Each structure stands twice: as C-alpha cells, then as structure tokens.
Image (cartoon, grey):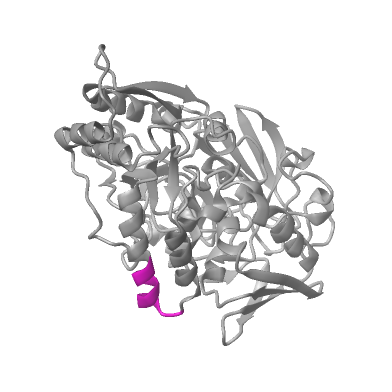
C-alpha cells in the first residue's frame, strides 16, 4: 500500500493515487529548474498522515512506513519516471537468454551508516531471511520461483530461477526490496529487532531522532555513495493525521510538502503562487492503487459468494468516490487497476448499484430477516482514514437488514487485526498494483500468500486455477500471453469477490514552490531536491 515521490532521480513514498503519465504541475517551474543551479543545505519538512510505527521497510508494504523509511535505504535499482530500472546499489546487471539467471554487479565501496562495508552477503541475507518471509509482494512473487541466490564475490549477486521470470528488475527497487544489513539483523527476529527503531541503512539520510507520533528527523549522510547527494541537510517528517490540518500547516509555512489535497482545498491552493501542485504519477509498488474491502472468507455469512455479490450490488461506490474522494479517481471495476491498460479486463462481471438484486441474493442464500428486520451483523475493522467510507457503507447496508458495526482504529492496529490476527469480518486496505500485476496484484489472491503478513491475501482466498494463472503470467515472455492469463484471473475473481475494489484512487500533491523538482516515481526522497 504505497506511492513514491521521486526527486530528480530518487524518491519519497506517498500513499494513494495513480495515473499513467509522469507527474505534471499546475504551475510549472520546469523552466526555472532547467536553468537553476542546485543549492546545498536547508531542511525539507514533510507532513506524514500516520506514524510509521517502525523503520524497517523490508518487513512490510505499509505506505506509512515506506513513506518515511525508504529514505534510509536503497534497492539494487531504482525505477525512473517511465518505470525503467536504473543503477542504485547495483551498477549493472545481465540477464541470461532464458530469463532464468540475473547477475548484478554491485557498486564498490558502499558503506552502511555505521561504517561497515556493504557486500553481496547483505543482499542474499535480505532476500532469504527478511523479504521472502515478511514483505508480502516480494514473498508472493518470488517464493515459489526463486531457485537460489549466489554470491561469488563481495560485489556480485546472482539470482537463479526455476522458470523464466521477466519482472525481476521491476521488483528490486527500494519499495519492493530495500536491502538491510546482515550484521545488524542476523540472529534476530527482524519484526521485533531494536534496529527497527534505530535503523542502519545505506541511504542518503541517517536517522537523527524519532519521537513516536510526532517527528522523525533525518540528517544528510556525508558518506553517501552517490557523490554530491543529497543536497538537503535535513529531512523532517511531522506526523499530522488530519488532512485539513496538513494543508493549514503548509499555508503557514510549518511544513513544505503535503502528499494529498482534500477536495475542498484544491481550488484555493491552485490560486496560490507560492505552491506547486502535481498530479500523482506512475511509480513502483505504491502506484495504481485501489481502495479495497477485504472479506474474511472463514466467517459466515461471508463464506457465501451470494452474500459477497449482494454487498457489491448494495454499496454505492459512486457516492464514496464523490463524497470521500471528491471525484479524485474512478469507480473500481476489476481486480487490476484500469491504468494498467494492457492487463486490465474491461469485460468482467459488473455490479452496478442495485439494492433489489442485493436483497434477492440474500434471500436466495437463506438469510432471512428477524423480527427486528435484521438479517445478520458484520463488523468493519478499518483505519480512521476510512471512517467516512464506513459511515456510507452502514447507510447502504441498513435497508438490506445488515447491521454494520464500525470499528475505527489507528492504522497500524487496524492492519494488525486484519492481516495478522485475522480478527475481522470486513477489513480495508489501499492495495497498490505497482508497475506490473505480478508485483502488486498477485500477493492479494494467491493461496501461498495466506498468513500473518501485512497486505497479503487477507481474505484467505484459495483458487487453484488463479494460482496457476499467476504462475503462467509470470513465466510468459510474450505480453499478449501474459494479458490473456490476467484477463481470466479477473473473470474468476470478479465472480468470487474475495475482496471488492471500491475506488481507483487518484490525487494531487502540493509543496512549497521554493523547492525544485519533486516527481512521482521510485527511489529515496530528496536526493536531488533543492531550494532557492
């Protein structure tokens, strides 16, 4: 669940939003950027909607964690604005003719923040002991197809696959595969290690201070392996949960960057010459995002497909788009975001708003009304940011005799109840597709990804045909063949409805115009952003 902000060649993770083009500004400063000389120094203050909880991005796909922590780490590559891989910790790579072996040559002389040398052993350890166990997108995609990782020398890493695997370069950036230090985490449970609050990375910034629920302050890494970067001296995240309060802080000069604009504030900010507004662009794992309901298939009556289909007919998604997202997005129609046009199936089963059909489906499932008119009760466990969505759902479902209890929680607590404890009827998430369905969609539906892992197959959905189709799509070299598999997956999932995409979210970001060149794609934040 995440988005990134690339700054000239690296990026900051931000949540929600999607479009197929690079970010565009409402008041372009591109001419000034083209002639400006980058200036060093200064502090960029960023509004964060949630506390990151911890600072190890390799054990989670949570946007709130990556939004902050990715600035402390690197991947083997970063993805440019067109989602092409560029050198990061790896200077170069070669791919065998059968697409089963990838060899990465690492940048020499890279140091961890504590001065210890970075080597190929760190990469092997990160994948085998952390990412393949706890990072839901990496685990679901690579666990069954990766044959092994070799380290012939300190600066060479070789990935060997059981079958051809085309999407690897799109999933080894800092979003999908942040590399952590073997000497820090070896012999520990990476989900509970002290280093999660005192991180040691290779990234452009080093942690200076973390005040829970308030501030995360980072300082420039003077030994960063990309010479001359970053330009900024400090990067500060201020935890401000309310979107309206974030905008007020921006207008008062208390923060410099806000990752989302509430609909009512857009017009006013657009007229403010001191601000630059950009539409969210394509990115890594945190792009092409869907606001999604997750149904716990182990709990009656949600184990009945007729009930899940009835909910699809009953929930007014257009109302949610209009009243919650102020029209910034599209009504969801499929398991794959429509912005991934080559893989998106427009001909899946549709569920337009139809309370009459919803009632009929509930009747056919044998769920009659009691004397009080109630058929059954459900609990909606959600982050507080989904509160308005929950209120509208409650209104939609009440006439059907469904009593929906709303349980708003802090985002990390809500995620834990949904994905780890499995203590919910209906959960919620922003599932981001990423640049390829293999990265962001597979993890939601394959049965091998059922378990206590954040943003995994939270519904507990099992369909052998879907599992097979995802494997076929990953191994296929031909894009048309891959698309055919993804089309069939969407047909099946839209009939089974283990979860339900409400809205394909889009959005706009805003920052102080005195800063240059924030773009939205992959990498670490503020390596090249500078201020006048």
Q: Depth check: 362 or 262 in front? A: 362
Whether residue 54 sits left or right of residue 83 in the image: it is right
Q: Depth check: 221 or 164 in front? A: 164
- Residue 377 lies within the magenta run: no
Residue 489, relative to residue 387: is it above or below? below
Give the magenta-colored segment's residue range: 477-485
**Magenta segment, principal secondary structure?**
helix
Q: Quadrant of residue 53?
A: top right
* Residue depicted at 64% across the width and 66% down the height: 76
The image position of residue 104, as x and y in percent, is 68, 75
Residue 395, relative to residue 209: is it above or below? above
The image position of residue 395, as x and y in percent, is 26, 23
* Residue depicted at 55% across the width and 48% down the height: 450
Residue 277, relative to residue 407: is it above or below? below
Would residue 415 be seen by someone viewing this image from the given angle?
A: yes
The image position of residue 227, as x and y in percent, is 69, 64
């Amino acid at each position: 669940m995440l988005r990134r902000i690339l700054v000239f060649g690296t990026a900051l993770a931000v949540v929600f939003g999607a479009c197929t083009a690079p970010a565009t500004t409402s008041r372009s400063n591109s001419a000034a950027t083209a002639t400006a000389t980058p200036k060093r120094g200064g502090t960029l203050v960023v509004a964060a909607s949630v506390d990151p909880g911890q600072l190890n991005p390799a054990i989670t796909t949570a946007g709130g964690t990556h939004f902050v922590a990715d600035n402390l780490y690197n991947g083997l590559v970063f993805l440019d604005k067109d989602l092409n891989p560029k050198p990061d910790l790896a200077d170069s790579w070669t791919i065998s003719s059968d697409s089963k072996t990838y060899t990465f040559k690492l940048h020499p002389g890279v140091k961890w923040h504590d001065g210890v040398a970075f080597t190929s052993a760190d990469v092997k350890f990160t994948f085998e002991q952390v990412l393949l166990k706890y990072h839901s997108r990496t685990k679901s995609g690579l666990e069954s197809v990766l044959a092994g990782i070799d380290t012939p020398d300190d600066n060479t890493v070789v990935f060997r696959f059981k079958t051809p695997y085309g999407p690897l370069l799109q999933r080894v950036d800092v979003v999908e595969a942040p590399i952590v230090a073997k000497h820090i985490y070896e012999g520990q449970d990476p989900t509970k290690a002290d280093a999660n609050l005192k991180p040691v990375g290779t990234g452009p910034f080093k942690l200076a201070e973390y005040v829970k629920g308030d501030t995360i302050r980072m300082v420039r890494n003077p030994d960063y392996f990309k010479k001359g970067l970053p330009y900024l001296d400090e990067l500060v995240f201020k935890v401000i949960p309310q979107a309206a309060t974030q905008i007020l802080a921006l207008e008062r000069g208390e923060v410099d960057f806000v990752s989302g604009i509430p609909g009512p504030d857009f017009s006013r900010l657009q007229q403010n010459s001191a601000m630059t507004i950009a539409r969210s662009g394509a990115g890594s794992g945190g792009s092409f995002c869907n606001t999604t309901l997750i149904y716990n298939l182990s709990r009656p009556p949600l184990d009945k497909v007729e009930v899940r289909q009835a909910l699809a007919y009953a929930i007014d998604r257009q109302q949610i788009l209009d009243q919650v997202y102020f029209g910034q997005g599209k009504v969801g129609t499929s398991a794959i975001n429509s912005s991934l046009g080559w893989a998106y199936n427009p001909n899946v089963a549709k569920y337009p708003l139809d309370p009459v059909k919803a009632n009929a489906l509930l009747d056919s499932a044998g769920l009659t009304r009691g004397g009080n008119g109630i058929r059954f009760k459900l609990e909606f466990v959600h982050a507080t940011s989904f509160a308005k969505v929950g209120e509208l759902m409650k209104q939609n479902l009440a006439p059907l005799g469904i009593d929906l209890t709303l349980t708003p929680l802090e985002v990390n607590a809500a995620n834990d109840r949904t994905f780890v404890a499995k203590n919910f009827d209906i959960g919620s998430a922003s599932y981001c597709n990423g640049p390829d369905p293999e990265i962001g969609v597979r993890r939601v539906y394959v049965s091998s990804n059922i378990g206590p892992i954040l943003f995994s197959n939270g519904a507990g959905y099992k369909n052998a045909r879907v599992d097979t189709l995802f494997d076929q799509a990953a191994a296929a070299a031909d894009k048309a063949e891959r698309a055919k598999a993804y089309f069939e997956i969407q047909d099946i999932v839209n009939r089974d409805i283990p979860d339900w995409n409400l809205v394909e979210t889009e959005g706009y970001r805003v920052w102080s115009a005195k800063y240059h060149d924030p773009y939205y794609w992959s990498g670490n934040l503020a390596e090249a952003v500078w201020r006048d």
